Structure formats: C-alpha cells, structure tokens
Image (cartoon, helix red, strand yellow):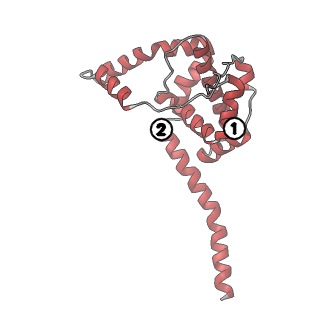
Amino acid sequence: MNMPMPQMKKPTLEEVLAYSNRDVVYRFRKTYGLTWEESEDIFDQVKKWLWMANHRRSSGISQGLSIDLSLVVIDEMWHNFVLFTKEYTEFCLHYFGYYLHHGPATEAEDLEQRERTRGLGPAERAEAIKNARRPQYEYIYDVLGEETFAKWYMEYPKRYSYLQLAEMQLQAVNDAMAAIRPRAQAEESRQHQTN
C-alpha cells in the first residue's frame, strides 16, 4: 500500500517564529549557562534556518544548505531541538508538512572539499571555501536580510565558537556541580553525626 506524499506547506517566517517551546530553550540555557534572552534568540535563529530550508525546497532549489563553523551555535540549538523528538516532529509537520532531517557532513563531502583545496595555502583555502559558499551567503542575505546575515556570520562566530561553547558547557556543569556539593556535604555530615 502506497502512502500519500505529504503536502508541503509554505508558512510565513512570522508564523514559524511565533512557535515557542520553553523546554527547548530551557535545556539549551541550562547546557550552556546562557540567559533566557540569548537562548530564545538562538532558538529564533534555528526557526529561521528551518523556515529558509523549507523556503528553498518549496521554491524548487535542490541544492541544500550547509552549516559551517560560523553557524555552530545554530547547529547546537538544532541538535537540542531534535532531542525533543515528539515536539520537533510535530513542529516540522505542522509548519512544513514533512520532517526536516538534519544530517552531518559525510566522509565523501569532506574528502571532496579537501580535494578542491589541496595544495592551496591557508588564505587561498579560506577564499576557495568562501567562494564555494557564496551562493548560500547571498541566499541568506536576500531572503533573511542583512541583520540576520550579520548576526550569523559576524556576531555569532565571535561569541559562540566551538571552543567558547565547550567552555560555556564546562562552566555550566561546574556551576551545577557546585550547587549540588553543599547539599551532598551537608547530608554526609548529618549521617556522620547520627553514627
């Protein structure tokens, strides 16, 4: 029995941005020790990314989008959202009519990029990669605007690099452990007093 193909939906960006999920934002905030405002803003950027992916597909553009190092914080929030599997699936089906898959770069894609830039110096390699991504940059700028483009490719790389996110996550874990230690020590002290 053939299942009918889902009907692709074309919501407005405003409709997608109106979606909220406190648990997704809370988990990200807790994981990285960010403020509610920072976490909500990053979640909004993920919703923009997902809307844009659907917009490209519904416009007949088959070339996919790729998340590069500049967008690592958007990628991390997307991973966070996907962990809420039921909610993420419902979000995708409600707004787009299908599930938007999230897949990492494959070995073949990494090898292809290395081959394209083999023998180039660091500056030439960076320029070649930037030129290969230029259509994506232009699409983001044209569809989401200068402010979003600047946030994604100028602001976020300075605030949320892989190293900075790892340090934030470690600090958040240390802060959580510090909050637990006094209670554990008090409990241990009570147990020693009763013995």
- Amino acid type of the residue that numbered disc 2 sits on in the rendered structure: Tyr
Secondary-structure class at tag 2? helix
Residue 55 place in picture, x, y as percent: 62, 16
Could you tell me which residue is drawn at 23 percent across and 22 percent down? Answer: 119
Which quarter of the rendered picture does the N terminus lie within?
Answer: top right
Q: Are marks 1 and 2 in contact (CB under 8 Å)?
A: no
> Height in image: 189 above or below 77?
below
Residue 145 in view here? no
Residue 101 place in picture, x, y as percent: 56, 30
Q: Which residue is mark 1?
A: 87
Task: Kindly report the distance in space between the C-alpha atoms of the residues bearing marks 1 and 2.
Answer: 26 Å
Residue 15 place in picture, x, y as percent: 75, 22
Could you tell me which residue is drawn at 66 percent across and 34 percent down? Answer: 89
Residue in front for this viewpoint, 45 or 36: 45
Residue in front for this viewpoint, 58 or 162: 58
Q: Is residue 148 left or right of residue 166?
A: right
Res 88 → quadrant: top right
Q: Which residue is mark 2?
A: 162
Could you tell me which residue is drawn at 74 percent across and 20 percent down? Answer: 14
